[in-house]
Image (tube, rainbow, N blue to C red):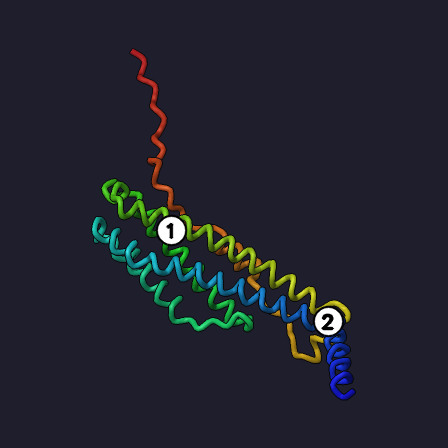
Amino acid sequence: MPVLIRSLLLLVLAASLSGCGYNAIQQKDETVKAGWSEVLNQYQRRADLIPNLVKTVQGYAQQERQVLTEVTNARSRVGQIQVNADDAESLKQFQQAQGELGSALSRLLVVSENYPQLKSDQSFRDLQAQLEGTENRITVARGRYIQTVQDYNTFIRQFPQVLTAKVTGAKEKPNFTVANEAEVSRPPTVDFGTSQPQPAAQPAPAQ
């Protein structure tokens, strides 16, 4: 009998937790964590490409030291940030640093357009393709993370989950702000397959 009673109590407890949204909160929390891990993975992929990119550009454009230094320094600042996605200020600093790195990359790639030999270098073109793909992955991963956080925050505000959230200490999670999203939604231009537009030909003067 005691075994049967304990089993019944466990069943009642499990049903109660399920009905109050506890299990769903845990599941959504794990989904958010997985989404954040993917965001970090894609940002790290970009950071890993930068040393080779800088080295390749430097081989053809050593005089562009300021732009090269800006990219290197921006990458270093990103690496020094210990981000906590559950802390709004930490997430803001992380996103700001990533935005600065993206801007520095954009300036570097614009400068690289002035060096035809660099543009035709196979290593550079390979890095170009990898960077473009990584920027797209960052955009996708960030978008998915935003959606999972919104879903989690909406869920724990609803009844009866809101009561469970208060009891268990589950709180709303910070998300990328609209300003952050606008800042990082413009990936660096990496298409070097086309040349600069030529000015239209002027009509010959009348004889």
Upstream in sequence: badge 1 or badge 2: 2
Looking at this view, is 49 or 27 the one in front?
A: 27
The residue tagged with tag 2: helix, strand or loop?
helix
The three-letter code of the residue at mark 2 reads: Ser
The residue tagged with tag 1: helix, strand or loop?
helix
Q: Residue at x 75, y 73 (%)?
A: 15
What percent of the width, then of the height, locates residue 51? 29, 59
Q: Seen in the image, is 150 located left or right of residue 58?
A: right
What percent of the width, then of the height, locates residue 37? 49, 65
Image quarter of residue 26: bottom right
What percent of the width, then of the height, locates residue 200? 36, 26
In the drawing, what numbered circle is on residue 18? 2
> Which part of the image, by quadrant, shows the C terminus?
top left
Q: Seen in the image, is 84 located left or right of residue 200?
A: right
Mark 2 neighbour class, 10 Å CA radius: few under 14, some 14 to 19, many 20 or more: few
Q: Residue at x 47, y 71 (%)?
A: 83
Q: Residue at x 60, y 61 (%)?
A: 148
The three-letter code of the residue at mark 1 reads: Leu
In the drawing, what numbered circle is on residue 195? none
Looking at this view, is 31 or 142 the one in front?
A: 31
Q: Which residue is mark 1?
A: 131
What percent of the width, then of the height, locates residue 161? 73, 71
> Which part of the image, by quadrant, shows the N terminus?
bottom right
